[in-house]
Amino acid sequence: MLQSHNPSGGPAGGRRPAPIDRPIVLVGLMGVGKTTVGRRLALRMNLPFVDADHEIEAASGMSVAEIFAKYGEDYFRDGERRVIARLIDGTPKIIATGGGAFINDDTRALILRDAVSVWLSAHPDILVERVGRRDTRPLLRNRDAGKVLAELARVRNPIYAQAHIHIVSNKTPHEATVAAILRALGR
């Protein structure tokens, strides 16, 4: 399933699609595949790929989980906002964000103004299956992943819905998600 509006104008009547002139930012809940899809999308579009969480870790010398544990979520979100602002520098690239990045009002306004935002969504049951493969998610530590993800979806999905493009990834292979994004971008 694909819902979108096409910010690039897309090919109509055989016209070539408009060039990508800004970053494409992937948003959505943890486990939806932003990093994996982002890497593949970048390869297909011949653009650089950047994972905002990895940039935060490189800048701080700590893992996201360590930052959460030592300084708390508010501190992390402030650093995340600054890193994403640095990454959205006007040059075309694919940026994968952490699940909470788009929830921050300032970060969301920046993304909506200066990038093409793509909301990747999946049913919480699918996300539970995916996030269960690794124990690196601070918001899930010692908690019921299904309950946490269902609540996050309830609260965050109306905010993610503000993204320019919405792609449902559910149980499809990542390549199908990449193809859906490319279609939504008129590629």
Image (cartoon, rainbow, N blue to C red):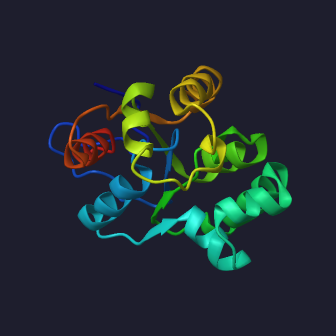
Q: Picture coordinates of residue 70 (x, y %)? A: 82, 62
Horizontal arrangement in the rendering, residue 93 relative to residue 98 (left or right): left
| Furthest residue toward left | 14
Horizontal arrangement in the rendering, residue 34 relative to residue 55 (left or right): left
When the figure is inspected, residue 102 is found, relative to residue 17, above or below; the finding is: above
Q: Picture coordinates of residue 159 (x, y %)? A: 63, 28
| Furthest residue toward front | 142
Please give the name of the residue rendered at 57% of the width and 31% of the height, measured from the top-left corner: 144
Q: Picture coordinates of residue 55 (x, y %)? A: 60, 72
**From where the camera sits, is residue 185 visible?**
yes
Please give the name of the residue rendered at 31% of the width and 31% of the height, measured from the top-left corner: 170
The number of numbered discs placed on residues in the rendered structure image is: 0
- The one nearer the camera, 90 or 27, is 27
Q: Picture coordinates of residue 1 (x, y %)? A: 28, 25
The quarter of the displayed image where residue 47 is located: bottom left
**From where the camera sits, is residue 85 visible?**
no
Please give the name of the residue rendered at 65% of the width and 23% of the height, measured from the top-left corner: 155
Horizontal arrangement in the rendering, residue 124 relative to residue 173 (left or right): right
- The one nearer the camera, 94 or 124, is 124
- The one nearer the camera, 35 or 105, is 35
Horizontal arrangement in the rendering, residue 49 relative to residue 184 (left or right): right
Please give the name of the residue rendered at 27% of the width and 48% of the height, measured from the top-left corner: 178
